[in-house]
Amino acid sequence: MKGIITIIGILICLNGFSQTTNEMWTETDTISSEIYEFQVPTSWRNYGKMMNGKNGPEQFFEASGKGLPISFNGGPIKISIFLVKLDKAKNLKDAKESTINGYFENPDRIFENEDNYSEKPFELSDSSESILLNTRFYRTSKRLNQSRYDLITYSKEHKTAYMFTVSFQYIDKTYEFETDKNLIDYAEKLYKTFKWK
């Protein structure tokens, strides 16, 4: 009986007293390549370069339980972050359109609203122009709702575009979780550290 009470206590602590977003950023690691640099919280699980960027993310991180509770509405909260090079994009507009088109290529995604995405300009720490996209949909295979943020950035100097994604999966068909937990702030804290070299 004592063991069960201890386990319940640990689960309550993990669920209700997770690290805040600001606390998460007190210790960071620098991630860099020949052409870009950004910071990530040290507490994120870093899977490094994936497949050298070919047919997959160039950088991949997993942050479930970091800055947000580990569960909500009886289901997990999954957080993944990845950086993907957009090889075919010749400018910022191309990169944005490629990303938006990609939203609808996966039949596993169900978009419940006519407004499938929103966008706004975003200025990087080096003053480069970028676009921040936000979309949300239901994943039938995961049985989870997803809020996704994509920073789209293009360097004229390097003639290179990237999609920098922060994905949150959870159970909430109203998607109020997105605003209640201020998910855009979670993503923007990361995006503000990105800069081209």
Image (cartoon, rainbow, N blue to C red):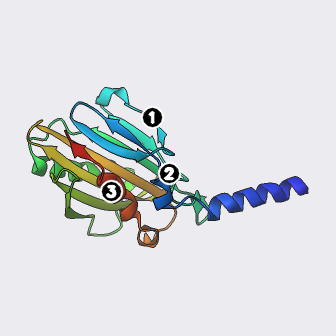
Please, which residue is most extreme toward the front here?
26
Query: Badge 1 is on which residue?
Result: 47
- Label placed on residue 107: none
Residue carrying label 3: 149
Q: Amino acid at mark 2?
A: Lys
Residue 20 location in percent, x, y? 52, 61
Dot 2 or dot 1, earlier in sequence: 1
Q: Nearer the viewer, residue 112 or 1?
A: 1
Quadrant hosting residue 148: bottom left
Tell which tag, 2 or 1, sits nearer the viewer: 1
Which residue is denoted by mark 2 in the rendering? 142
Q: Earlier in the sequence, mark 1 or mark 3?
A: 1
Q: How far apart are labels 2 and 3 at the CA level?
A: 18 Å
Secondary element at image label 3:
strand
Is 119 placed left or right of 79 in the picture? left
Can see residue 63? yes
Residue at the spot 35% in from the left edge and 52% down from the top edge = 190
Q: With respect to residue 143, does 90 lie above or below?
A: above
Amino acid carrying label 3: it is Tyr
Marks 2/1: CA–CA distance? 22 Å
Task: Say what secondary structure mark 2 lies in.
Answer: loop
Coordinates of residue 41 in the picture (x, y in percent): 45, 47
Mark 1 burial class by Cα count in 10 Å: few <14, some 14-19, many 20+? few
Query: Label 2: few (<14), some or many (≥20) within 10 Å?
Result: few
